[in-house]
Image: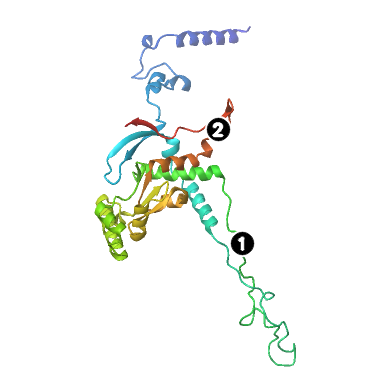
Amino acid sequence: MTVKEIHGLKEAMRALSFSAQSCKTLPARTGFSICRRSMATATPVPDITRSVSQPWPSTTVPLTIYSFPSLEPRSVESWSTKHLHLPLRRDILHLAVVYEGDRTRQGTASSKTRYEVAGSHRKLSPQKGTGRARRGDRQSPLLRGGGKTFGPKPRDFSTRLNRKVYDLAWRTALSYRYRRGELIVSEDGLDLPLPDDFLQLAEAGRLGRVLEDGFVRRYLRQMMGTLRWGAEHGRSTFITTERRPNLFTGFEVAGQEGRALEVDDVDVKDLLETGRLVIERSALREMIQQHQSDLVSRVFINGVRVQGPPLGTPILT
């Protein structure tokens, strides 16, 4: 080993012994420390204890069940966030609305071609020598009463959409209403509480159709105005498991205040149109149960498929 190599080795050992000393024993240089730290040592270590002690996001949300029309709270249930607290996905809602609109198109428009129009197919005039334009038979699209060129024919306008995406759109629409406070869940048996005196007179036939409709219209307008659910506040959609005579008949008379639908007649567009949703508890459970295919696992345990989150667990009655 040469003298130069020995001198370099001594300098390296001196540097190692110098860096091994404590920062407190080293002299200060005008406020700067001689100690140097690498990027790895300078990075602060996360407080693992503090991160664990922070509460995790809740997986359930509360849902209050009201009585109609007094809106008195009756019970509180716990629903999964995958049912009533999903983030807003405008793209999925758009796909669902377009899918439903395409399925409702009749596609029955039809026109006749020149070969389907009745009449003689004789050539109207000679091809040449008349001084006029060439004309074929009476069924020509160029003549009045002739066939239609490239006219519409019966067709199917329906499109396809993955069922899991469609079910996700249903729960996304309900979650959007829930977060905005526009989802009101009532007890089962939702119906319009008309006065007993009026019902007795109507059943006895002592009131005419005009008087009955006028009373129901005024009564419903007053009730909806008191609740701030009427036409001035965006109308309301009432959803029940079956047809309720007073409720459905009342909104048929006073349709400007809202509308009533059975759960089988509801689609995603209906959940987004009016100002708020008033749904029966059983109708909501049926709606969620029918549209949670993306939450049902394919795994079978003891011959039973693992289902999604529970539908509404009572926490306060």
Residue 189's spot in the image, x, y percent? 36, 44
Looking at the picture, how far across and down is residue 278, in whole percent?
A: 36, 47
Image-quadrant location for residue 185? top left
Q: In the image, is 136 to the left or to the right of 240?
A: right
Q: CA distance from mark 2 to mark 1?
A: 37 Å
Can residue 19 be seen at all in this image of the molecule?
A: yes
Percent position (x, y) of residue 183? 36, 44
Quarter-wise, where is residue 251 in the image?
A: bottom left
User: Which residue is painted at 56% across and 11% down in the image?
Assistant: 8
Residue placed under numbered mark 2 in the picture: 297
Q: Indicate the secondary structure of the residue bearing disc 1.
A: loop
Which residue is found at the position 62% from the left and 66% from the top? Answer: 153
Q: Give the residue number, with chain letter if any, for mark 1.
A: 155
Q: Residue at x 37, y 9 (%)?
A: 25
Q: Earlier in the sequence, mark 2 or mark 1?
A: 1
Tell me, yes or no, whether the two marked residues, 2 and 1, touch with CB atoms within 8 Å. no
Tell me the crowding category of disc 1: few under 14, some 14 to 19, or many 20 or more residues within 10 angstroms, Cα based: few
In the rendered image, residue 159, in percent from the top left (x then y), is placed at 58, 53
Q: Residue 81 is drawn in which quadrant?
A: top left
Q: What amino acid is at disc 2?
A: Ser
